[in-house]
């Protein structure tokens, strides 16, 4: 699905670290002190759209850094100077909160997402995702790309869904375990694997993959992205940015990119 140029014309799809701009229209912020936001890799596209909306309001732009939620949380734990963290699951936010790295009262759910099976657009897969479905057979001699389920939220969701569908035993040794969900998407985009499991918003952002099916929401834990300000990095610009990310203007952008606004 194509996006308006004003949102993503400048955006490369398989980027691990992205500099984007955001500014807060509701309170005065200092241009010399922009917030640093650590955000899950699957938020790369929507972050640029939010940046465009922010910048159009004439306010200073914070920096967005994108990677797997697990990697970002561990960097914050070890002192990385992020003002705001946006995780692709509850677990990594819980991880930081348990270590007193989250400012009390600032945590809020930002968006939800779906989980889909994808294939290269030039080699689409026809398969019904249901209990007992034979994804291993559909792969032939190929492998399945997913984010690493030992740490990355998208991979954990994928493993849970495959277990619920009864497909995990036949696939657990046939995986390409990517560092993050965008890397899993890239394996499929390049045709290096016949299929992958990513978020619905990742699939929608690419014109090189086709969706073979959507996993039932009940087959995996709810996909929720919490956000919060990081302890020791609680500034007025960070508070202003968090307010914007909770605003109706931001929610409209989330929905445009296929997220569920919470």
Image: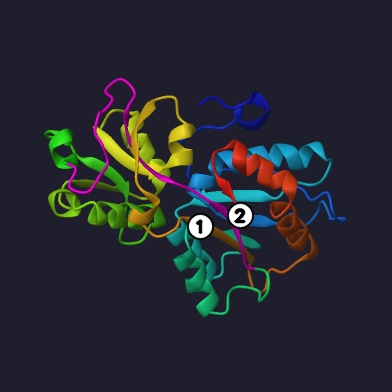
Could you tell me which residue is drawn at 74 percent across and 39 percent down?
53
Q: Residues within 10 Å of mark 2 (few under 14, many from 20)?
A: some
Give left or right: position of 155 versus 253: left
Q: Quadrant of the C terminus?
A: bottom right
Q: Secondary structure at mark 2?
A: loop
Viewer-side residue, 189 vs 169: 169
Q: Secondary structure at mark 1?
A: strand
Q: Residues within 10 Å of mark 1 (few under 14, many from 20)?
A: many
Could you tell me which residue is drawn at 48 percent across and 45 percent down?
16
Give left or right: position of 222 versus 262: left
Viewer-side residue, 167 vs 106: 167
- Label 2 vs label 1: CA separation? 9 Å
Q: Which residues are magenta?
A: 107-133
**Contact (Cβ within 8 Å) of mark 2 with mark 1:** yes
Quick check: is 109 in the magenta stretch? yes
Residue 105 lies in what quarter of the image?
Answer: bottom right
Could you tell me which residue is drawn at 43 percent across and 61 percent down?
70
Residue 35 lies in what quarter of the image?
Answer: bottom right
Quick check: is 194 in the magenta stretch? no
Horizontal and vertical percent position of residue 56: 79, 36
- Numbered circle sitting on residue 261: none
Which residue is identified by label 2?
262
Which residue is identified by label 1?
224
The reply to whether residue 238 is in sight is: yes
**2 vs 1, front mark:** 2
Above or below residue 124? Residue 131 is: below
Tally of marks: 2
Mark 2 or mark 1, earlier in chain: 1
Query: Furthest-top residue in view?
Result: 122
Above or below residue 72? Residue 129 is: above
Horizontal and vertical percent position of residue 181: 40, 46
Horizontal and vertical percent position of residue 241: 73, 55
């Amino acid at each position: 699905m194509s996006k308006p140029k004003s949102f993503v014309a400048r955006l490369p799809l398989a980027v691990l670290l992205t500099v984007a701009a955001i500014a807060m229209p509701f309170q005065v912020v200092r241009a010399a002190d922009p917030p640093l936001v650590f955000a899950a890799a699957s938020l790369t596209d929507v972050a640029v759209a939010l940046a465009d909306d922010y910048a159009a309001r004439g306010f200073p732009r914070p920096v967005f850094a994108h990677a797997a939620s697990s990697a970002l949380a561990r960097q914050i734990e070890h002192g990385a100077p992020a003002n705001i963290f946006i995780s692709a699951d509850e677990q990594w936010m819980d991880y930081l909160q348990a270590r007193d790295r989250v400012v009390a009262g600032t945590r809020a759910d930002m968006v939800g997402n779906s989980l889909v099976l994808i294939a290269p657009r030039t080699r689409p897969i026809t398969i019904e995702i249901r209990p007992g479905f034979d994804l291993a057979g559909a792969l032939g001699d190929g492998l399945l790309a997913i984010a690493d389920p030992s740490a990355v939220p998208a991979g954990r969701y994928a493993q849970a869904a495959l277990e619920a569908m009864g497909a995990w035993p036949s696939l657990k040794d046939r995986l390409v375990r990517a560092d993050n969900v965008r890397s899993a998407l890239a394996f499929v985009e390049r045709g290096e694997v016949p299929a992958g499991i990513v978020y619905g918003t990742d699939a929608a952002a690419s014109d090189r993959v086709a969706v073979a099916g959507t996993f039932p929401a009940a087959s995996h834990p709810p996909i929720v992205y919490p956000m919060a300000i990081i302890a020791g990095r609680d500034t007025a610009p960070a508070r202003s940015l968090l307010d914007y990310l909770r605003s109706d203007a931001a929610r409209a952008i989330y929905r445009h990119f296929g997220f569920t606004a919470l």
